[in-house]
Every structure is written in structure tokens, then in C-alpha cells.
Amino acid sequence: MPPVYATAADLAAYTGTAAPADAAVKLTRASAIITNVTIGAVYTVDGTGLPTDAATLTAFRDATCAQVVWWAATGDPTGAQGRLASTTIGRVSLTFRTDTGPASSPRARTAPDALLILQNAGIIP
């Protein structure tokens, strides 16, 4: 199990509002995504898998919070919308992707702000 990079208190501080009741679940899922997009990054960790450098830990924390915020903003916490090739509202029509291309990649399911935080911290290219 990957480490969880942020707490409900961190999320509340990041957003300036109270954390949702299911914050721990969302932060755990978001941490897994952040772990996935940072595979190959080089940084020192402690025995629990958390970065030991304060700036790196802050970037992981903030990226995790940004991921949860993005889910709330998009209403897509599962990434299912990234699988849509097209939609129509009148008379409802959905076309799902059948490929495993860019929309199904981990980065496609990662909040743009989370990637920006990790890039600016020099953790990912």
C-alpha cells in the first residue's frame, strides 16, 4: 500500500474549507495516483515511504490535495470521463474509447495542478 501524502487537515488548509467526510478515502486514492505518476522519480524516503526532504514532502502533499480538488471540480473521481470519446446531451449519446491510448494513461487521470506542483518541485519532468 502506498503512503498517504496528506491528511484531512492538510486538505482543509489547502482548500480553505472543511474537508469532506470521506476525505481519508479520497486522499488515499489520490496518493496512489501521485505515487503512480512519480514512479521513476528519485528522492529519499523514510520507513513508511514518505519523502524525507521537507520540500519534496510538501510537493507530494499539495499534489495529493490538488488531485482531490480536481475530482470535486470535475465531478469525476474515478476517471471514467477520460474514457469518453464523445458525448451528446439531447437524447443522450455516449461513445467510450476502446483503445488504451493517452486518455487511459495515469497522467490523463491526474489533476493538471498536481502535475504542475510535481514538475515545479523537480520531482517529475
Image (tube, rainbow, N blue to C red):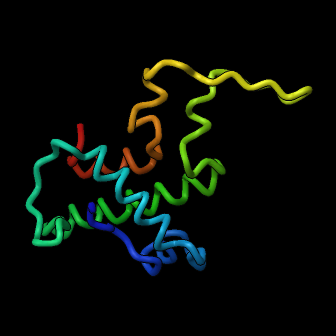
Q: How many marks?
A: 0
Whole-percent x, y for residue 75 in the image: 66, 51
Is 95 on the left or on the right of 114, as rendered? right
Q: Residue at the far right: name it.
A: 91
Q: Quadrant of the C terminus?
A: top left
Q: Quadrant of the N terminus?
A: bottom left
- Name the image quarter holding residue 57: bottom left
Residue at (17% x, 65% y) in the render: 49
Is 71 on the left or on the right of 33, as rendered? right
- Name the image quarter holding residue 15: bottom right
- Name the image quarter holding residue 119: top left
In this view of the protein, which residue sits in the foreground, 77 or 14?
Answer: 77
In this view of the protein, which residue sits in the foreground, 93 or 65?
Answer: 93
Whole-percent x, y for residue 44 in the image: 8, 61
124 to 4, vertically: above or below: above
44 to 113, vertically: above or below: below
Is 90 on the left or on the right of 119, as rendered? right
Residue at (59% x, 77% y) in the render: 21
Residue at (16% x, 42% y) in the render: 40
Residue at (32% x, 68% y) in the render: 4
Whole-percent x, y for residue 82 in the image: 56, 33
69 to 100, vertically: above or below: below
Whole-percent x, y for residue 116 in the image: 37, 45
